[in-house]
Image: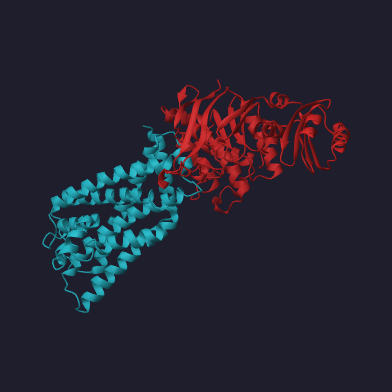
Chain colours: A red, B cyan
């Protein structure tokens, strides 16, 4: 039987800068109100009412830019960040009331490889198994298997201090699987991996999931979310702004295609005319042009150029993108995921 | 309580300590031994110090070695493990309440402090040669003091290790450890400060004073020393306070 994950109204306010590994991201501290004491000025609302339900046996993705609250959500679910409000459950266990039981069910890969530098790769796996009460013979067997699987056998007896970033990341993932957890949490797992290793990682995650295990990962890579996840929550500024399967989410973008147009100058007449073009579902005005959502892409250009010509406006730049999660994020927030 | 996890964490620390044994011994034993040689042999044999100084020095050296070893054994790894690499994260996730990881650190630091005491005592004795004049009339009381010193050192290491950042290690040595050693009645008995009444009162805030004086009182009772029961009482209070502060700081540092 698989184990699900649930959160209810999670809110987290940091009153001191979160440690990099726990909070991560680029927090911009919001300065307190005028007149408040400077010492109390640091306050960051990292999460504001996040409720999620991840079913047993699914791969669930949290997609959002840096500082959106992904790491904090995973931190709360993995006992590393104490929520200011709200609850989180791993299976039937309330994470903050039944910590030990919850910890037993989970494996965690943090955003930065946090390996034990005092040990060799094999020892890291073996001691990790020991913390979870795995018997010595079984530990040896699983270590060998995982080292092999993650292509680390050759350097298994080296201290990990000399490992490259990618090797550390692979070992961190192997370690999280060492005690065969029911739920695997991965915080931006493919950061720093070369494309080949990324594919290997995806395959390993899928395979792990096929054995009935639940996987929850965070990423700012749409391709990764799209390729791996059964369902995705798009998160920004501590809020879930969209939730569904990748296809559902992509279908929810008006029109699907996004044309980002840059003009010499903007006028309401242009925007109004563009809005009336056949197939255009939405036009959002930007400072130097418009974002135009439509059910077709390139074939609209000729008509757009004609409209602009009527208003003596030059078209400086056109960017056409097909339906994607990136467009969805842009649609909801007005910002690109990469910004 | 999950003893299997606790034992595995102890085994991990023992494994790492075994690997670093030579460095560890040099780090903690070399300096006291040099002190013993210079003060206890060179200065005494050249007639610049009275021969009775040997008996005064050895308990102080044992105290300072135990205290520094314990603090070092707990604080230094903690400072490194709590840095941005967060090496400790994996152990914080072990299926056990995180306070027990702090308790494990205290326990392991105690063992190291006790081992260093057990090594420095005979070695120092050997270096000093004959005429040290140590009598262990009350072994139970002596062991109690030794135990309380071990707790003080490792709980102190926990509190310090969770309060100091990597960039402040140098400061920790010059601001905390060095004054603690020199005003810790290690190389002289507390009564030697009679001519400096203010300093004599102030050093009573330094727990190392009670460690040195406690060992003096139980190893060379004929030498001047603070009353041993008072010393044991203060050490006990210091131990409890440091454990509470250490666990609190550890919790604060572990969970954001």
Q: Residue at x 25, y 71 (%)?
A: B39
Is residue A173 positioned above or below B144 on the image? above
Q: Is residue A80 visible?
A: no
Tell me the quarter of the picture where residue A327 sits.
top right
Coordinates of residue A122 in the picture (x, y in percent): 54, 44
Q: Is residue B67 toward the left or the right of residue B189 in the image?
A: right
Q: Position of residue B125 (x, y in %)?
A: 24, 64
What is the x, y in percent for residue A310?
87, 36
Is residue A305 shown to the viewer in this render? Answer: yes
Q: Quadrant of residue B135?
A: bottom left
Q: Nearer the viewer, residue A135 or B112?
A: B112
Going by the picture, which residue comes out furthest to the left? B222
Q: Position of residue A215 (x, y in %)?
A: 59, 29
- For residue A116, side relative to residue A169 (left or right): left
**Image quadrant occupied by the C terminus of chain A:** top right
Q: Residue B133: which quarter of the image?
A: bottom left
Q: Outermost residue toward the bottom? A: B46
- In the image, residue B225 above or below residue A268: below
| Count of numbered tags | 0
Q: Quadrant of the N terminus of chain A?
A: top right
Tell me what residue is drawn at x 63 percent, y 33 percent.
A205
């Amino acid at each position: 039987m698989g184990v699900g994950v649930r959160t209810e109204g999670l809110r987290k306010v940091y009153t001191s800068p979160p440690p990099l590994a726990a909070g991560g991201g680029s927090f911009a501290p919001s300065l307190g109100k005028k007149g408040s004491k400077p010492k109390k000025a640091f306050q960051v609302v990292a999460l504001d009412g996040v409720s999620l339900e991840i079913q047993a046996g699914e791969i669930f993705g949290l997609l959002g830019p840096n500082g959106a609250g992904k790491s904090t959500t995973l931190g709360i679910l993995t006992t590393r960040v104490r929520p200011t409000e709200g609850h989180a459950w791993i299976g039937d266990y309330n994470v903050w009331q039944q910590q030990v039981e919850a910890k037993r069910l989970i494996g965690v890969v943090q955003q930065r490889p946090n390996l034990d530098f005092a040990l060799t790769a094999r020892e890291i796996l073996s001691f990790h198994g020991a913390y979870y009460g795995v018997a010595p013979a079984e530990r040896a067997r699983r270590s060998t298997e995982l080292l092999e699987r993650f292509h680390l056998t050759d350097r298994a007896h080296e201290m990990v201090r000399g490992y490259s970033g990618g090797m550390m990341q692979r070992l961190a993932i192997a370690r999280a699987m060492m005690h065969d957890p029911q739920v695997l949490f991965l915080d931006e797992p493919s950061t720093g991996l070369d494309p080949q290793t990324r594919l290997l990682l995806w395959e390993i995650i899928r395979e792990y999931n096929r054995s009935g295990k639940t996987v929850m990962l965070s990423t700012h890579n749409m391709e990764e979310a799209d390729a791996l996840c059964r369902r995705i929550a798009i998160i920004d500024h501590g809020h879930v702004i969209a939730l569904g399967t990748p296809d559902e989410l992509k279908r929810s973008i008006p029109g699907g295609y996004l044309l980002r147009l840059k003009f010499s100058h903007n006028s309401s007449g242009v925007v109004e005319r563009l809005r009336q073009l056949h197939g255009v579902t939405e036009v959002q005005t930007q400072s130097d042009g418009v974002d135009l959502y439509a059910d077709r892409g390139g074939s609209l250009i000729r008509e757009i150029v004609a409209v602009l010509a009527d208003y003596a406006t030059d078209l400086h730049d056109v960017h056409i993108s097909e339906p994607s999660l990136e467009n969805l994020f842009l649609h909801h927030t007005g910002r690109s995921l990469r910004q | 309580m999950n003893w299997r996890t606790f034992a595995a964490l102890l085994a991990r620390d023992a494994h790492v300590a075994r690997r670093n044994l030579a460095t560890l011994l040099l780090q903690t034993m070399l300096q006291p031994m040099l002190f013993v040689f210079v003060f206890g042999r060179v200065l005494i044999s050249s007639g610049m110090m009275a021969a009775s100084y040997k008996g005064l020095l050895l308990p102080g050296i044992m105290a300072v070695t135990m205290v520094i070893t314990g603090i070092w054994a707990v604080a230094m790894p903690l400072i490194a493990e709590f840095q941005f690499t967060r090496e400790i994260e994996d152990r914080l996730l072990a299926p056990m309440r995180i306070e027990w990881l702090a308790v494990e650190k205290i326990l392991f630091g105690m063992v190291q402090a006790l081992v260093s005491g057990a090594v420095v005592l005979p070695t120092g004795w050997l270096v000093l040669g004959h005429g040290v004049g140590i009598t262990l009339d009350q072994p139970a009381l002596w062991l109690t003091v030794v135990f309380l010193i071990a707790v003080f050192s490792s709980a102190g290491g926990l509190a310090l290790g969770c309060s100091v950042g990597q960039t402040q290690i140098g400061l920790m040595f010059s601001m905390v450890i060095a004054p603690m050693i020199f005003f810790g009645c290690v190389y002289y008995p507390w009564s030697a400060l009679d001519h400096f009444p203010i300093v004599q009162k102030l050093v009573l805030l330094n727990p190392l004073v009670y460690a040195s004086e406690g060992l003096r009182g139980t190893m060379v009772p004929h030498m001047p020393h603070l009353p041993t029961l008072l010393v044991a009482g203060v050490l006990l209070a210091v131990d409890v306070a440091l454990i509470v502060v250490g666990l609190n700081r550890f919790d604060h540092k572990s969970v954001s």
